[in-house]
Every structure is written in C-alpha cells, then in structure tokens.
C-alpha cells in the first residue's frame, strides 16, 4: 500500500489526544472515611473492573477512528504488483510517456450487436486518454503508419485525429510496431513509460516471432477487443485454365472460395464480371471450414488488356467480397522463323498467312547464318525450320530465351548434324534424337486433352481423326529427367509431336515443341493434311503466350514492373477512379521500371497511365490473412503469457466500463480513502453505542 499524500500521516499524532484523556481519567480517587465500608468496598471492586473495560474499548475506538480519518486524508492506494508493475504516481508531476498501438487492419471490420471491433478499439483509446495526468505525453501508432516518424503529443491532439483513422490493408506485423514503439520511447521525455496494444490479436497475423521474442523491457498492456469471431467467406484465388486463348472461343476460369468459420453457408452467389459486364453467375453452398472450387466459362471479343472481378454477397465482413484480376490477350505477336539453307517453307508461310493467323502474328523470316546476329528478345516466339547446325553459344542463347518464359517450335532437317542436334535436345529438354527413319508411318495416338487440341475438333469427331502419310521422320526421345508430353505418336510408338517444358532450378521457363518431320512434301503429306494449319497456329499461340495472365498482387507486397516504352520522361501513374498514385520509377534500357511497395491501400483494377495512354492494368487485392478472423481469446492470451514467460507484458480485459476501472487501477492503483472514511465513521458509531448502551452494573 502507498500514500499519495504522505505528509498527512503526521496527523497520526492526533491519536495521542484520546490516550492523554484516558490517562487523565485514570487518576486515583479521594479517600472518604466511613465507619463501616466492608460492604461498599465489595461494590467498588466490581464497578471498577467494568468501568476499566468500557474505558479501554472507548479508547481503542477513538484511536481507530482518528487513525482511519488521518489515513483517508493521506490518500492510500493499494497496488497489486503481480498484476500491475507500474509504479503509482506519488506526485502530480510524476508524468508518463505512453505509446498506444491501435489495430486498424481489415479484420477489425468484424462486428456484433453493439458495433464493430474497430469502434470498440477507439473507445478504449478514449478511456486511456481520459486517465491523463496534466503533462502526460502520448504517441498513437496504427498498423499502417508504424514505420513513419512519430512524435509525442498531448492527449487532445490524439482525440482530434482519432476519428480520422480508418481501416487499412497496408499493415505491418505487431512485432515491427512494438519494436517501433520501443524506439520512440527511447526518445521520450519521461522515465516512466507504457505501451498499450489494442487489437483483435488475430492468429493469422500474430506471428511466432512476437510469441518468442516478447514485447521488450517497457511495461506493455494487451487489450483484446475481439468477441466471438463471425463466419466469413472469401475468394482465395483466380486462375485462367485455358492455355491458348482465341477470340470468340470459350475461356475457362477457376476460383476458390474459402469458408473461415464453423457455420455452413447455403444458397450463396458468386458473380464474374469482365470489363465491367457480368458474364456469369453461380449459386453454391459450402460447409464449415472448407474450400470449394468454382469454374466459369466466358469469351473475349477483342485482344488487349482486360480487367476481371469476382463478387460475393457475404455479410457483414465485406472487404474481401471482391477478387480483382487482369489479363492480356495479345494481337500481332512477332514470330521469328529461322530456316535452314534451301529449306522449303511455302506451306508454313501459307499457314501463317491464313485469315486467323495473319491477324495474330507478324512473321519475320531469317536465314540460318543470321541467327547469331539476332536479338531474340525482340520476338514473342521462334520457329526453327530445317536448321542444320547449332553452335554451343547459339544453343545457350536459345536456352536463355526459353527460360524467359517463351518457346520454340522445332522442325528437323534431313541433313542434320546428329551430335549438334543431340546437344540442342539435351540443353532444351533433357532429351535426344533417334536415328532418321525411312519408312511409312501413320498417326497412332493423340493426346486430345492437350491444350493444342482444345476447340480444334468437334467432340463427335475426336475419335475419327484421319492420319497423314509420313515417309520419313526424325523423332525426339525424352529422357526420364525431362518434363514432357507426347502429343502425337506414330504407329511404331515414336513421337511425331512432343512438348517439353524447360526449367532451371526455380525458374519454370517456357516450352519447346519437337516435330518429327519438316514442313514440306519430302517428309510426307502432313503439310496437306487438315491438322497441319491448326497445329501450326496453336503451337505459335502457345509459345508466344496467347494470354498473359497477370493475375493480381496483394496489397503490401513489393511489386516491380518493367514497362517497355520509348518515352522515358513522361511519368507513369496508377489510377483507380479518383485515386492517383505515382509509384517510384527509374529508366531502364528498353523502358521504365516502376516499384510499388506501400503506395496502394485499396483493392481494385488500376490503370497504368502514361500521359493520356493506358499502358495496362494492374490488379490489387487485400491480403488473404486478414480474412481469417480466428483470434486469440483471453484465456489463450493468458496461457501464452505464462508459456512464453514474457516480462513486463500484461493482459487487461473487460468491457469498456470495467476496463476503465481496471486501467485506473493499473495506472494509479486502487484508492482506499473512501474505505478509511467509512471505517472512521464505523468506529465513531461504535464509540457512541458504547457510551449510550454500555452501562456499568453494580452487583450487591
């Protein structure tokens, strides 16, 4: 127990007053002579004992009454050090530097019948400020601005900015924010310091690093605001399944719905919008704590960048009811065709000059001896037709090109150098070539599930595909280490067309298509067959990237984009409605590189604009972790405090009303002056009762 007004304890000397009175009353009485006093002496002895007991009781009550009154004026405070380590203010000038950490992440949008968790948190901030002692200083940190410089201010300034704070998606970890608070407190004015953390203590964001490292040396108070977490639906992912996209042909899209909660959802609706128009809507039901995949089919009427949006009707958590994405359907892809000396390519050129191919591709034909002088990066895909020789340097250039995500279509030469061909196949596909075969073969098996055949043949005719006549062929042989697919097989089991995916370590890379014949009549009548033009067209689409699925980024991620442009002076802007953001940017060889870190705070499909020209779309969504509203309950936090043995970290719990008193006790201790006033009055009442009702009886 402590005394805020310890000087008043000098008043305890007042207890000497009843003691002196008592001593005076104990003086010896005068003697009066009587003739026979034997009977009177017996009466006096009995009366004297009763009087002494009464006087001692009155003395004790007077001492206690005066003592309690003096202690009340000394303002006694009880401090439970096991719960509250903060020293009680002994003087009015004993000020404190306080850092209040307010969780304004999107999960604080959760609510119950009394309001949102975020409003609870703001009310708790108000309670903290209401216990200010004149001279205290405060610093308010939120989960989105903790990295910026903060200063300590008076409580009134905090009260002014508190209504302006909104929920945000750009959040930092609690560990980073607490670390920032400790840095700020190192610059604080006062020696007495405190940190208050007001949060829902969401499990998905309250990381292991905080659990293991603790909160530091400054006394830190956790104030949980989360009640029972409501069930919540969110769209976790979007993926375009169609690998080769064509205008006015069906495109398949897959999305995943996650139910975070113990409640089953029935008759929910998800809607797909492309370029602002609804193209599909589906109803679904999903069980508790489960994930469900939903597929959509839609078509695109024109090339270029497109923006997509998936919508849910989940309530009351609405921030994650949307999933934005964007994708690019190219037009006029530039294809490099490198042909061997005297190689015939008329049928191949005719396939590219068809109405459908001509719209999508620009063909650049070069000779084999020019290959080493070309910049492959200028092309979206490469066709190698009858090339006879491959130097080591040229093979490495092709490998680098494919590892960048693009591809090559390979047609062999009848005059091939077997060793150089095997070196090419080894480097680009972990394979080799078989010996040249001079015998007639026909197609035996088709992998009709391969994207090359999607929408090529009618379903009722897929099993009746006629085969061309192959006179000679040079087949690719895949090794066990290669990632390959034999798309078309010949009658002897050898490959007529194989797809090989090229990767290196974590780099996924692109693909190489290996044909077993050249595109002319000397190999057979394949160039006259009805499968020739579709396969050329679709392999070209596949290697050139018929769709660039950009997908989306999560807000808070570091995003670097390289924009190819000749104008390196006009700045690039991100625009979404009335919001304009100028990201960090720097010139590079072929354009501008932009860096997006914490510029974006709102989900959406943003236009990347240079001047008045829309360069592309960039899509941003809220982090998935915020959708999981599961949080640590009070009991779990208490167990955590004990398990990790955090020093100087304490849990404050209760409603806003009970918390106000709890905070006051934590800050100032439990004041006991009222108790001592009551005790003083009780002792005075006992004294009165003793004087009135305690009678000394005379026994004869």
Image (tube, grey):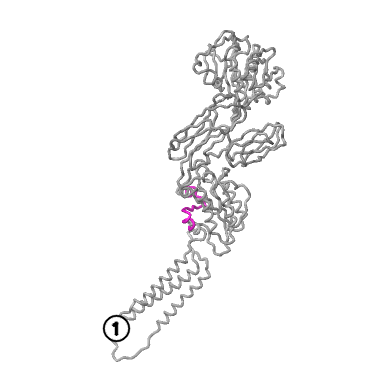
Q: Which residues are magenta?
A: 640-661
Determine which residue is flagged by label 1.
Answer: 42
Residue at the outermost left position? 700
Q: Secondary structure at mark 1?
A: helix
Residue 657 lies in the magenta-colored region = yes
Query: Which residue occupies the foreground of this view, 312 or 237?
Result: 312
Q: Evaluate whether residue 648 shows in this view.
A: no
From what the image shows, is residue 498 above or below residue 625?
above
Q: Is residue 598 left or right of residue 261?
A: right
Q: State left or right for residue 99 relative to residue 611.
A: left
Q: Is residue 18 above or below residue 208?
A: below
Q: List x then y, in percent, for residue 161.
A: 59, 52
Position above or below: 41 against 315: below
Figure quadrant of the C terminus: bottom left
Frontmost residue, 5 versus 453:
453
* Crowd tier of the residue under label 1, counting other residues whose Cα lies within 10 Å: few below 14, some 14–19, many 20 or above: few
Is residue 334 in view? Answer: yes
Judge left or right: residue 386 versus residue 207: right
Q: Residue at x 61, y 53 (%)?
A: 186
Instruction: Please state the horizontal and vertical placement of residue 262, each as a whole percent of the image.
Output: 43, 40
């Amino acid at each position: 127990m402590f005394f805020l007004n310890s000087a008043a304890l000098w008043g305890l000397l007042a207890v000497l007053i009843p003691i002196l009175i008592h001593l005076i009353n104990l003086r010896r009485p005068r003697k009066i002579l009587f003739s026979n006093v034997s009977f009177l002496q017996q009466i006096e002895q009995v009366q004297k004992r009763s009087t002494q007991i009464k006087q001692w009781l009155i003395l004790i009550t007077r001492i206690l009454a005066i003592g309690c009154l003096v202690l009340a004026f000394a303002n006694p405070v009880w401090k439970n050090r096991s719960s509250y380590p903060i020293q009680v203010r002994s003087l009015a000038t004993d000020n404190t530097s306080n850092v209040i950490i307010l969780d304004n992440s999107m999960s604080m949008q959760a609510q119950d019948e009394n309001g949102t968790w975020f409003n609870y948190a703001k009310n708790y901030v108000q309670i903290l400020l209401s216990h200010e002692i004149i001279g205290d200083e405060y610093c308010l940190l939120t989960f989105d601005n903790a990295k910026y410089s903060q200063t300590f201010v008076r409580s009134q300034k905090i009260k002014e900015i508190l209504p302006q704070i909104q929920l945000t998606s750009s959040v930092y970890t609690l560990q980073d924010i607490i670390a920032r608070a400790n840095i700020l407190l190192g610059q604080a004015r006062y020696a007495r310091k405190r940190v208050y953390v007001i949060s829902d203590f969401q499990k998905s964001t309250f990381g292991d690093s905080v659990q293991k490292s603790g909160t530091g040396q400054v006394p830190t108070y956790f104030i949980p605001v989360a009640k029972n977490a409501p069930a919540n639906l969110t769209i976790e992912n979007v993926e375009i399944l169609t690998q080769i996209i064509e205008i006015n042909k069906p495109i398949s899209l897959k999305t995943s719905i996650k139910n975070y909660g113990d409640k089953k959802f029935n008759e929910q609706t998800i809607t797909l919008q492309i370029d602002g128009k609804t193209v599909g809507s589906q109803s679904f039901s999903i069980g508790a704590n489960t994930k469900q995949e939903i597929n959509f089919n839609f078509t695109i009427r024109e090339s270029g960048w497109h923006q997509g949006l998936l919508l849910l009707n989940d309530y009351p958590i609405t921030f994650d009811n949307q999933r934005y994405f964007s994708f690019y359907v190219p037009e006029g892809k530039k294809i490099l065709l490198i042909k061997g000396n005297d190689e015939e390519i008329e049928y191949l050129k005719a396939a590219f000059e068809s109405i459908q191919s001509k719209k999508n591709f620009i063909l650049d034909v070069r000779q084999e001896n020019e290959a080493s002088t070309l910049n492959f990066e200028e092309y979206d895909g490469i066709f190698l037709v009858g090339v006879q020789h491959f130097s080591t340097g040229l093979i490495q250039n092709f490998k680098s090109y494919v590892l960048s995500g693009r591809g090559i279509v390979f047609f062999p030469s009848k005059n091939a150098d077997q060793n150089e061909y095997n070196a090419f196949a080894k480097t680009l596909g972990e394979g080799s070539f078989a010996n040249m075969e001079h015998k007639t073969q026909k197609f035996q098996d088709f992998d009709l599930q391969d994207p090359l055949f999607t929408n090529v043949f009618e379903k009722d005719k897929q099993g009746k595909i006629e085969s061309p006549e192959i006179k000679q062929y040079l087949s690719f042989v895949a090794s066990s280490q290669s990632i390959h697919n034999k798309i078309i097989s010949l009658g002897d089991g050898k490959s007529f067309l194989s797809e090989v995916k090229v990767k290196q370590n974590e780099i996924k890379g692109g693909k190489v298509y290996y044909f077993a014949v050249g595109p002319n009549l000397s190999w057979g009548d394949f160039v006259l067959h009805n499968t020739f033009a579709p396969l050329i067209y679709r392999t070209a689409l596949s290697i050139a990237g018929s769709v660039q699925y950009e997908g989306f980024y999560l807000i808070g991620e570091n995003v670097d984009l390289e924009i190819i442009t000749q104008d390196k002076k006009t700045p690039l802007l991100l625009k979404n409605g009335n919001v304009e953001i100028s990201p960090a940017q720097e010139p590079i060889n072929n354009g501008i590189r932009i860096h997006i870190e914490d510029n974006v705070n709102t989900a959406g499909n943003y236009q990347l604009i240079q001047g008045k020209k829309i360069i592309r779309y960039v899509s941003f969504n809220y982090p998935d972790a915020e959708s999981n509203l599961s949080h640590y309950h009070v009991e779990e936090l208490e167990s955590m405090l004990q398990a990790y043995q955090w020093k100087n970290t304490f849990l404050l719990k209760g409603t806003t009303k009970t918390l106000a008193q709890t905070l006051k006790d934590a800050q100032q201790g439990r004041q006991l002056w009222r108790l001592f006033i009551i005790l003083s009055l009780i002792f005075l009442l006992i004294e009165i009762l003793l004087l009135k009702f305690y009678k000394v009886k005379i026994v004869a």
